[in-house]
Amino acid sequence: MSETTGRVLQLLGLLQSRRVWSGEELARRLGVTTRSVRRDVDRLRDLGYPVHASTGHGGGYQLGAGAALPPLLLDPDEAVAMAVCLRVAAGGSVAGIGESALRALSKLDQVMPARLRSQVSAVHESTVTLGAATDTPVDPDVLMTLARASRDHEHVTADYVDVRGTATRRRLEPYQLVTTGRRWYLLCFDRDREDWRSLRLDRMTEVRAQGSTFIPRDAPDAATYVRHAISTAPYRYTARIRYAAPESIVAQCFPASAVQVVADGPDACIVTTGGDDPAAMVPWLAMPGCDFHVLEPPELIEAVRMVAERISRAGSAC
């Protein structure tokens, strides 16, 4: 592959990864002059890729949707089949597949003509999946809208029903999507509450990108924030337990979305999790099969004593 060909392919990848790039940004990423960028853009146009250019504030190069798919990629039937499969995969339970499928679908949707999008929607709406991987399915269009808005820093509005059943209208700055395998979450900044939020996508409806953009804030780590929000924040009790086993061993015994595991030396770790019923938590916390010591709360410490005494009495009666 020649240097020019490789650079043109790299340019195409950059244009697919974000909505708008300035000529100066592309030149820096590619290590060339803005004049070379213009020549490479012309090469992409000659190959059939619809690259638009605009001037002024917020202007730059943008990969648009054309009247036909670019050559050497997919014909219309293949594009529809691929998009339908990716929509199904985006809601699947295989580790990593949902996120990868969503990224691929976002790239494909960006250059897909409107008539093909309608075909994809028609097939998807007339299809029922037996034995879905999750009992909280998410509309692929909601996934697509939030993925694009997160990438392009675009304001979003949505109706949301929280865990208490309260319905509200939200004005959001979306930052990143997080999947646990069973559910999808959005890390976002709530403009009305002026604070960060972790929202479940299956509780969101009427999701709309507003067209206006925002300047990104210093965001918390998405995975850490969502893990804390779903493992401890919704519950009455927050528990900390020290296990006499390495972090790598204990972490395999719990769903990653339900606990936070931190090493406490080479042969021990501390688990933080949440629950509403201390007695019901005890058998679950005993799953690693090693010695453990409850650090807090007092209610869980008392529940461990009660369960231990009950089990001891049951053993004595045998």
Image (spheres, helix red, strand yellow):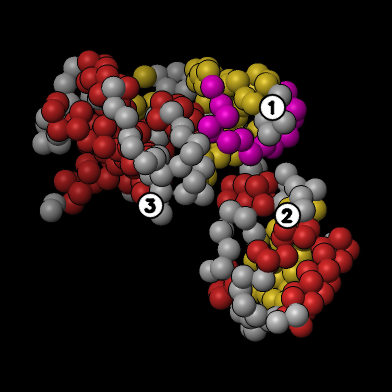
Eyeballing the image, is 121 above or below 220? above
Counting residues from the start of the chain, the first of labels 3 and 1 encountered is 3
Q: Helix, strand or loop at disc 3? A: loop
Circle 3 is placed at which residue position?
A: 94
Eyeballing the image, is 287 above or below 50? below
Q: How dense is the environment of label 2, judged by Cα within 10 Å: few (below 14), some, or many (20 and up)?
A: many
Question: Mark 2 belongs to which amino acid?
Answer: Gly
Counting residues from the start of the chain, the first of labels 3 and 2 encountered is 3
Whether residue 198 is in magenta: the answer is: yes
Question: Mark 1 belongs to which amino acid?
Answer: Gly
Residue range (magenta): 190-205
How far across and how far down the image is residue 58, in percent? 47, 23
Label 1, label 2: how many angstroms apart (C-alpha)? 21 Å
Give the residue drawn at x 41%, y 26%. Answer: 141
Label 3, label 2: how many angstroms apart (C-alpha)? 26 Å
Q: How dense is the environment of label 1, judged by Cα within 10 Å: few (below 14), some, or many (20 and up)?
A: few
Q: Is residue 152 visible?
A: no
Q: Splitting the image into 4 quarters, where does residue 49 fall?
A: top left
How far across and how far down the image is residue 296, in percent? 83, 65
Circle 2 is placed at which residue position?
A: 274
Q: Is residue 292 visible?
A: yes
Q: Nearer the viewer, residue 125 or 48?
A: 125
Q: Is residue 295 left or right of residue 32?
A: right
Q: Splitting the image into 4 quarters, where does residue 75 fall?
A: top left
Give the residue drawn at x 19%, y 17%. Answer: 67
Counting residues from the start of the chain, the first of labels 1 and 2 encountered is 1
Circle 1 is placed at which residue position?
A: 165
Q: Splitting the image into 4 quarters, where does residue 161 fall?
A: top right
Question: Mark 3 belongs to which amino acid?
Answer: Val
Q: Helix, strand or loop at disc 2? A: strand
